[in-house]
Amino acid sequence: MKKLSYKSAHEELEKILEEIQSPDTDVDKLSGKIKRAGELIKFCKTKLRMAEEETKKIVDEMKGNDTPGSTN
């Protein structure tokens, strides 16, 4: 999963959703698809959290608040 991008994970999630909603879904493979979807959701949440933290850090640096307790 380390080489996976957010975009490709999101696309794979959408594909899984389509497959799950299809009336032709193979019930024997359903639990595997759900498990994979859970892994992808966790991956995407982590990527979003990291992006949010990085963005906040950049904004804080631009405001002159690069470290907590800074005297800038």
Image (cartoon, grey):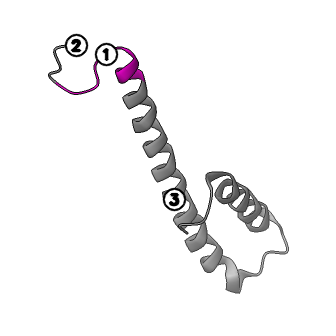
Q: Are marks 2 and 1 in contact (CB under 8 Å)?
A: yes
On the image, the x and y values in percent for residue 32 come to 61, 79
- Asked if residue 66 is among those painted magenta in the image, a careful observer would answer yes
Q: Amino acid at mark 2?
A: Asn
Give x and y (percent) for residue 11: 73, 56
Residue in the foreground of this view, choosing between 38 and 44: 44
Identify the element where label 3 is drawn.
Answer: helix
Residue 22 x/y as whole percent: 82, 66
Q: Earlier in the sequence, mark 2 or mark 1?
A: 1
C-alpha gap between disc 2 and disc 1:
6 Å
Q: Secondary structure at mark 2?
A: loop
* Residue span colored magenta: 59-68
Prevailing secondary structure of the magenta residues: loop
Name the residue at 60% across, 78% down: 31
Residue 64 marker = 1
The local crowd at label 2, few if under 14, some if 14 to 19, many if 20 or more residues have their Cα within 10 Å, is few
Q: Residue at x 31, y 15 (%)?
A: 64
Quadrant placement of the N terminus: bottom right
Q: Secondary structure at mark 1?
A: loop
Q: Amino acid at mark 1?
A: Gly
Is label 3 or label 1 in front? 1
Mark sitting earlier along the chain (3/1): 3
Q: CA distance from mark 2 to mark 3?
A: 36 Å
Up the image or down, 69 lies above or below 15; here it is above
Farthest bottom residue in view? 28
Q: Which residue is mark 3?
A: 43
Relative height, residue 34 to residue 14 (above, below): below
Residue for badge 2:
72
Q: Quadrant of residue 53?
A: top left
